[in-house]
Amino acid sequence: MVLRFDQARLAALVTSVPELSVGLARQALDRVLELPVEEQDVLLETLAAWFDTDGSPADAGRRLHCHRNTVRYRLNKLAQLTGCDLRKPGDITRLYLALEAVRLLPDQVRG
């Protein structure tokens, strides 16, 4: 896996204390992780695309080959399931770190 320097620092943070990262991910995403894996993947891929496009539903939709309203619907569903508000920096940070934990430690988070 090749990472940019800024990504490597975040990866080091998430993986340096895996128990803490896994706990955070499970707490933040508990109801999402109860869904069938296919539904989890759709919601988490949508969240990742939204982060990767700096919060643009239109750009995330293009990346995911779906309409921006579909992205908004999925993000709203994720917000309902997690209780997070995607307008609050603390909630966004929590979800970002949880998503990174799922990406870097998938067997531990989902297992």
Image: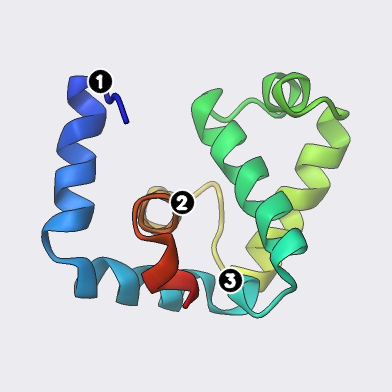
For image coordinates 57% across by 30% down, the residue present is 55
Amino acid marked by disc 3: Gly
**Disc number lying in front (2 or 3):** 3
Q: How is the image coloured?
A: rainbow
- Mark seen at residue 88: 2
Q: Nearer the viewer, residue 54 or 10?
A: 10
Q: How many other residues sit within 10 Å of disc 3, few (<14), some (14-19) or many (≥20)?
A: some
Q: Which residue is mark 1?
A: 4
Based on the displayed image, in which of its 4 quarters is residue 94 positioned? bottom left
In three-dimensional space, the C-alpha distance between marks 2 and 1, rounded to whole angstroms, equals: 26 Å
Q: Position of residue 77 (x, y in %)?
A: 75, 61
Based on the displayed image, in which of its 4 quarters is residue 47 positioned? top right
* Disc 3 element: loop
- Which comes before the other along the chain, label 2 or label 1? 1
Amino acid marked by disc 2: Lys
Q: Which residue is mark 3?
A: 83
12 to the left or right of 95: left
* Disc 1 element: loop
The number of numbered discs placed on residues in the rendered structure image is: 3
Q: Nearer the viewer, residue 68 or 85?
A: 68
111 shown above or below 49: below
Amino acid marked by disc 1: Arg
